[in-house]
Amino acid sequence: MTHGNENIMVILSSPSGVGKTTLTKKIQQKYQSFKVSVSHTTRLPRSNEINGVDYYFVSFQKFQELINKNNFYEYAKIFENYYGTSRNEVDKLTSSNDIIFDIDWQGTKQISKFKNLKFIKIFLTIDKDELHERLTKRNQNTKEEITERFNSFDKDNMHWSDYDYVLINKNLEVCFKQIENIIKLYKKPTSEIHKF
Ligand code: 5GP
């Protein structure tokens, strides 16, 4: 794991609907040093999403080509679509930025194998009772998608132990503060870190 003034890489994973995207945006807004790693996906853009900002939206064929060319650090099939972190994206950001990865547990497992990359891995979850309401309220998914995402909650949660921190996003501001505290721990000025 990285310490001190070095750039850090934070992975945020969660079951769908927990508020990860909102938290990712909040971190980026408050800390200019953080850039979000923009993933490739075969999923269609939602009405508010912009190509190259939220995702690089590509066809299945293009995604397969990128897999064949070994272009991804990791990729996974999630809810019938592919999502992946391209090497180009990470290499472009890595030298002068802190990076946030909004990826699932499968991607976290794969990318963790690259020992040259050091991550702070945070798993976010919520109370299951709240989840259905949130998925419905955010109005981004069809009824079938909501059911699918709700049903995968327990399976996704099983992977919490692969992470360094597990946070419960009951209250957005409290959860954001907890993430900030974790970030500050790793971004401490080098002089404050005790060497052994
Ligand atoms: P959504 O379709 O709601 O944007 O994302 C669905 C899931 O895909 C989320 O859990 C998100 O974290 C995950 N995801 C997004 N990009 C990537 C990626 O590049 N790799 C992996 N493994 N998961 C991703």
Image: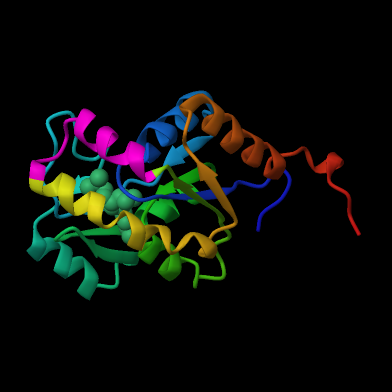
In the rendered image, residue 141 lying in the magenta stretch gets the answer yes
Lateral position of residue 57 relative to residue 106, left or right: left
Q: Is residue 52 above or below residue 25?
A: below
Task: Tell me where residue 105 appears, x and y as whole percent.
Answer: 40, 61
Would you say residue 158 is visible in this rendering?
Answer: yes
Q: Is residue 113 above or below residue 86?
A: below
Of residues 159 and 77, the one nearer the viewer is: 159
Q: Is residue 20 above or below residue 58?
A: above
Task: Tell me where residue 49 appears, x and y as whole percent.
Answer: 19, 33
In the rendered image, residue 1 lying in the magenta stretch gets the answer no
Of residues 63 and 126, the one nearer the viewer is: 126
Task: Tell me where residue 45 appears, x and y as whole percent.
Answer: 13, 40
Would you say residue 53 is visible in this rendering?
Answer: no
Quadrant of res 111: bottom left
User: Which stretch is magenta?
Assistant: 128-143
Of residues 137 and 129, the one nearer the viewer is: 129
Task: Name the residue located 24 percent from the left edge and 40 percent from the top edge.
Answer: 52
